[in-house]
């Protein structure tokens, strides 16, 4: 008898877990329903075009006027004293960041079915934000990999000299995978996404981005224009994913002017309701 009860409990847990995963997936791919999604789309388009124009011009200026000079000032590749820089740079590696976020999502999915309704709602609210962080990084990283393959820009000193115009399109080699910087894409996308959900974290995330992009330059992994282009792709990609979530009322709300803002977490909403005067 106890074995049968345990088996039934396991089946109920598994059914709940599968239902949770299915519901989460359907929420992400369902048609957009927010009444102000058009305003948000127009705002996204305006901001994306403006950022692309400004940063795109900066990339060209850096490529022509600074890239060769900057990398010539960096310490030789493989210098023993750069061990701490090699450690720091891995905090912006796309594989590690995405695996960490995926692992956190897995923990949420495994824990949620066994919790009481209130705790489950709070955890699932956090899980929605984790989903946003994951896709806000994944989408621009994938776009960046395609651009890397198309551009085929040589990393600093590949070919024996500081040539910022060493392009071998469609080469697909690691030596010609300099433009754009995947670390810059990852760090900027993650910083934007975390700041979009938790605005108070913005100063910390700015420091994080600066540290990561600096390590890529010091290690002679990229030219300055590579990290700036990576930052552009990261922020545009994360903005697009934020719009995707907001249009489906997942974690974000849309103001009348199209501004996208985070929806307060369940815990904060409960505290706010508790602080309001009760009805007579």
Image (cartoon, grey):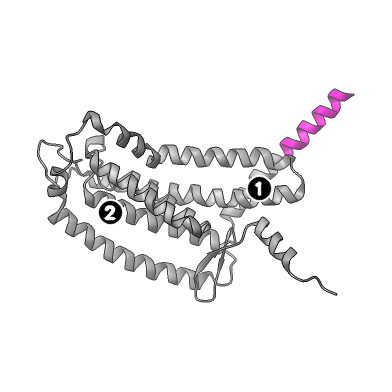
Name the quadrant containing residue 218. top left
Q: Secondary structure at mark 1?
A: helix
Residue 63 vs residue 100: left or right? left
Magenta segment boundaries in residue numbering:
1-16
Name the quadrant containing residue 44. bottom left
Residue 14 belongs to the span the image colors magenta: yes
The outermost residue toward the left is: 161
- Please provide percent x and percent y for residue 169: 21, 44
**Is residue 143 among what the camera can see?**
no
Could you tell me which residue is drawn at 59 percent across and 38 percent down? 106
Q: How many marks?
A: 2
The secondary structure that dominates the magenta segment is helix
Residue 82 belongs to the span the image colors magenta: no
**Is residue 48 among what the camera can see?**
yes
Which of marks 1 and 2 precedes in the sequence?
Answer: 1
Name the image quarter holding the N terminus: top right
Name the image quarter holding the C terminus: bottom right
Q: CA distance from mark 2 to mark 1?
A: 36 Å
The residue wearing badge 2 is 228
- Please provide percent x and percent y for residue 131: 55, 49
- Please provide percent x and percent y for residue 11: 77, 33
The residue wearing badge 1 is 123
In the displayed structure, would residue 116 be above or below residue 269? above
Out of 75 and 252, give the one closest to the viewer.
75
């Amino acid at each position: 008898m106890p074995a049968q009860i345990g088996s039934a409990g396991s089946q109920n847990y598994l059914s709940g877990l599968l239902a949770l995963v299915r519901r989460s997936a359907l929420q992400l791919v369902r048609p957009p329903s927010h009444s102000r999604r058009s305003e948000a789309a127009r705002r996204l388009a305006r901001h994306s075009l403006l950022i692309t124009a400004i940063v795109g011009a900066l990339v060209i200026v850096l490529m022509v006027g600074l890239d060769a000079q900057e990398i010539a000032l960096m310490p030789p590749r493989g210098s023993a004293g750069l061990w701490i820089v090699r450690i720091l740079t891995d905090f912006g590696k796309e594989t590690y960041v995405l695996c960490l976020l995926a692992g956190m999502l897995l923990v949420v999915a495994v824990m949620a079915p066994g919790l009481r309704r209130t705790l489950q709602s709070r955890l699932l609210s956090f899980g929605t934000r984790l989903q946003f962080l994951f896709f806000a990084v994944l989408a621009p990283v994938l776009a960046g990999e395609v651009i890397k393959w198309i551009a085929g820009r040589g990393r600093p000193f590949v070919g024996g000299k500081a040539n910022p115009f060493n392009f071998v399109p469609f080469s697909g080699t690691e030596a010609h995978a300099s433009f754009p910087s995947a670390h810059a894409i990852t760090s900027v996308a993650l910083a934007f996404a975390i700041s979009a959900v938790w605005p108070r974290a913005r100063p910390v995330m700015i420091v994080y981005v600066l540290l990561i992009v600096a390590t890529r330059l010091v290690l002679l992994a990229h030219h300055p224009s590579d990290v700036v282009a990576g930052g552009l792709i990261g922020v545009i990609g994360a903005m697009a994913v934020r719009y995707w979530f907001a249009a489906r009322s997942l974690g974000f709300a849309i103001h009348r002017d199209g501004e996208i803002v985070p929806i307060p977490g369940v815990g904060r909403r409960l505290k706010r309701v508790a602080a309001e005067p009760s009805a007579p």
